[in-house]
Amino acid sequence: MSSTLVTGARVLGGEPTDLLLTDGRIAAVGPGLSAEGAEVVDATGLVALPGLVDLHTHLREPGREDAETVETGTQAAARGGFTAVFAMANTFPVADTAGVVEQVKRLGDEAGWAEVRPVGAVTVGLAGRQLAELGAMADSAAGVRVFSDDGHCVSDAVLMRRALEYVKAFDGVIAQHAQEPRLTEDAQMNEGTVSAVLGLRGWPSVAEEAVIARDVLLADHVGSRLHVCHVSTAGSVEILRWAKARGVQVTAEVTPHHLLLTDELARSYDPVYKVNPPLRTQADVEAVREGLADGTIDIVATDHAPHPLEDKDCEWAAAAMGMTGLETALSVVQHAMVDTGLLTWAQVADRMSAAPARIGRLAGQGEPLAPGSAANLVLVDPAARWTVDPAQMATSGRNSPFRGMDLPGRVVATVLRGRPTVLDSHLVRSTP
Amino acid sequence: MNRHLLSAADLDRAEAVAVLDVSEEMAATQRREIKKLPTLRGRTVVNLFFEDSTRTRTSFEAAAKRLSADVINFSAKGSSVSKGESLKDTALTLEAMGADAVVVRHWASGAPHRLAHAGWTRGSVVNAGDGTHEHPTQALLDAYTIRRHLRPAGGAGQGGTGQDLEGVRVTIVGDVLHSRVARSNVLLLHTLGAEVTLVAPPTLLPVGVEAWPCRVTNDLDAALADGAPDAVMMLRVQRERMESAGGGYFPSAREYTRRYGLGRSRLALLPGHTIVMHPGPMNRGLEISADAADSPRSTIVEQVGNGVAVRMAVLYLLLAGDGTTTTTSTGGPS
């Protein structure tokens, strides 16, 4: 029997208390706990949250091990305070069969840094033409519940309708990458005053909003669950607000970068700021913050997208889209949402742990920090500040748009099923 | 002047006027029997062209050679992302060769900016046209041409030396959306005090154009008749814009010409002193008729010649003006 005693932690930002973790579960919560032989973690001054859950991570393996592996990606997750990540399907081969999703799950289990839940592709090869064997992936050892062609939009309305309907049989959800393909051919950045000056082809807001509008109506019509990936525009927030008021079963995510950064950064032509959907305007940033605060947007998801250096060390138009995010997510959320008074720590726990676990139907994650729950938690020092340095990160990707920024909040410890994966802000390999 | 010329916005009014003034001096040397100046002897200028442009490359090459610079033409053609050597490796190669200035033409907007700021090369970078972004030396030669015609032998001297373009009305017509010439001209002409009007079908104006320092209209006849422009600049319209994604930007070449072409009848709307400009290469019969292109108002051929003088001025100001050549015989331009 192994025990860890966390002392003096401010659970969800409340009064200091102790947590006793025994055999992978929370045994007791309260002040003045003691336990013979337990490893003691002094959490004085630290905020304790349930282990974070990322519904949108690109781990790249199999196929793009030059960008990231399950090992390095989940190390990054642990460093960022995550105890579970959903691995997107755009690997090589694509995660569109039971075999591939089981492989990804197994790689995650072997690495042991965070629980890895594969996302299954909606369509064969992400090609948008034919449904992948969603049932086989759901029934596999990977137990897939989230399906997404992320990186590509399921733009065919009939195919989207069938997918939404089909996954009801096993309580699945379709996570849509909302991007009207014809309106965004060769699109490079947000379409607006900045793209007009820079001569970069625009990615208009309407290309996202039109798909979300269609999909919430489809989800309503067939009574299915829809999840919208990386919401980036003010108009999208308005449509989601309308849909939720109407009772549509829709959930949505926003990325840390869309909570903080704007298209003004493209003026540098540095492809580290190139991402899909693109960075938008300050008005959009304010709208997605407001949406996250009032619950219109349910969760924060990183869309962690590591790329090898050469895919970013080039002309803007030639560069890959995407940014790393696992190791900066909590700091960015504290900076953009907590320190601004828009979210409490309890709400952060909801948006970054409980709600994503619920949307992904992931048991044993996102549970309250209370006796009986799985012992997944993160201890963060909200008073610490740090300067983002991609070279110091666990991810293989160096493409952090936050590099050089001074951010608040440092993940001091992460605990996965009772075992610390991070202590004193460093990865630790502990034995079960 | 900054170390690089990446955008027309890099120049303030005094700097822009200074470039035009030095261009004037350079042009004067080009009327001599011996055209070559020793100014940039021992300096190396690389013409790095990722996109074919014989006109612009030749113009820069002539400019550098007449300043006695060593010129290396480096054609790194490869119109797609996947082909060819990376920009970074090309830049490192040129750095190893000791390039003092890199004149870059690239299909990707922002490539010169990247070259100047990514730490791959120490030389000055001159943007010779990048994607649909900018073409600042084209704007400078256009401003120079306008000044020569509309500020002739002004108080300060020949060709309007020392003068800006305050109050000059310039109308730019055509495919603004894809035009690097339009972007640079709007910025530079505005800096110089000119009043710029853009005329284009709504499909060929970028979303966000309303933030530009100019007027925008879709009605060419009104712009010519009521606007009484001092200069009309016609932009090249690529015929393939009719068939591209989304069903084309305009229905047919014939309709484009009817609504936005400069032909005989529209030429008659112009005040007597108005000049007609085109950055070339022209689509005769599409955006401009032979009547307009070959009329006495046309400065189109003159623009080409002015391009050499302006590019001499830019290279001179970037390379000889940096104070690092004091030990060699630099020899001023006049």
Image (cartoon, coloured by chain):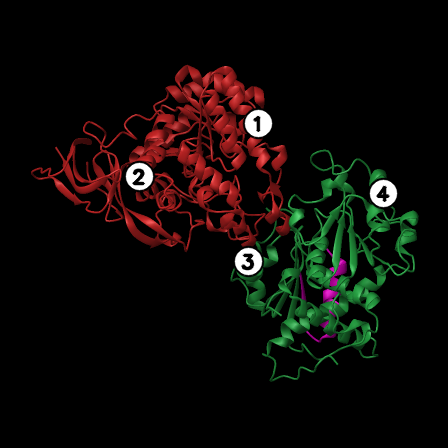
Chain colours: A red, B green
- Please provide percent x and percent y for residue B1: 62, 70
Residue on which the image places disc 4: B257
Q: Amino acid at mark 2?
A: Trp
Location of the C terminus of chain B by quadrant is bottom right
The residues bearing labels 1 and 3 have C-alpha atoms spaced at a distance of: 38 Å
The location of residue B276, given as percent across then percent down, is 85, 57
Q: Residues within 10 Å of mark 1 (few under 14, many from 20)?
A: many
Say whether residue A63 is visible.
no
On residue B89, which mark appears? Answer: 3
Mark 3 or mark 4: which is in front?
A: 4
Give me the C-alpha separation between circle 2 and circle 1: 37 Å
Of circles 1 and 3, the one toward us is 1
Is residue A34 in sight in this rendering?
Answer: yes
Q: Quadrant of residue B16?
A: bottom right
Q: Which residue is mark 1?
A: A155
Residue A288 covered by magenta stretch: no
- Give SS at disc 2: helix
Q: Is residue B72 magenta?
A: yes
Q: Which residues, given as a range, are shown in magenta?
A: B53-74
Q: Residue at x 89, y 53 (%)?
A: B292
